[in-house]
Amino acid sequence: MTISCCTWALAGTEADALTAIAQVGLRHIDHRPFDFRSAESRRLISDLELTPACMATGFGMPEGAALDAADAGARDAAIEHTRRALEYAHETGIRRAYLLPGEEEGDT
């Protein structure tokens, strides 16, 4: 079984979050699209022997965009965001991702 930690759940800098995860003995991380872009963050992930495991593609979705939007422009924006997130996941070695299909009116 792979147990990972959502990096965005921790306060502080990227380095703080990564260090805290490694200090408790976890080795897999889940992160949001476009986190850990700097060479320093990527080096720290490697140095701490952390493995990016899953991408939460819905984070940072443009306002009003949704994969199930009735409006073609809003749907296209969501598809483009998701495509870029998946490309970034691939760049960073992540092989798993999850999508958020949208919400029904009144769901919150």
Image (cartoon, helix red, strand yellow):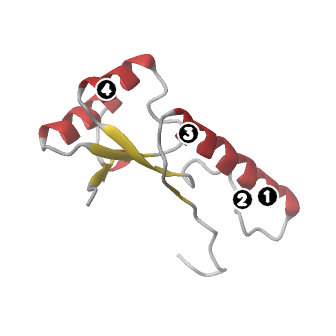
Circle 4: residue type? Ser
Query: Could you give the CA–CA distance between mark 3 and mark 2, rounded to whole angstroms?
Result: 26 Å
Circle 3: residue type? His
Q: Quadrant of the N terminus?
A: bottom left
From what the image shows, is residue 99 above or below residue 82? below
Circle 2: residue type? Gly
Query: Could you give the CA–CA distance between mark 1 and mark 4, rounded to whole angstroms?
Result: 37 Å
The label shown at residue 90 is 3
Q: Residue 38 or 27: which is nearer the viewer?
A: 27
Say which residue label 1 marks.
74
**Which numbered disc flags the more N-terminal residue, 1 or 4?**
4
**Which numbered disc flags the more N-terminal residue, 1 or 2?**
2
Q: Secondary structure at mark 2?
A: loop
Label 1–label 4 contact, CB within 8 A: no
The label shown at residue 53 is none
From what the image shows, is residue 15 above or below residue 63? above
**Which numbered disc flags the more N-terminal residue, 3 or 2?**
2
Measuring 72% from the left and 58% from the top, which residue is drawn there?
A: 65
Label 3 or label 2, whichever lies nearer to me, is: 3
Label 4 CA crowd tier, 10 Å (few <14, some 14–19, many 20+): few
Question: Residue 26: x percent and y percent?
Answer: 20, 46
Label 3–label 1 contact, CB within 8 A: no
Label 3 CA crowd tier, 10 Å (few <14, some 14–19, many 20+): some
Label 1–label 2 contact, CB within 8 A: yes
Residue farthest to the right, as pictured: 72
Instruction: Judge from the rendering whether residue 32 lies leftward or rightward of residue 85; answer left or right.
Output: left
Label 2 CA crowd tier, 10 Å (few <14, some 14–19, many 20+): few
Q: Secondary structure at mark 3?
A: helix
Say which residue label 2 marks.
64
Say which residue label 4 marks.
46
The image quarter in which residue 31 lies: top left
Q: Secondary structure at mark 1?
A: helix
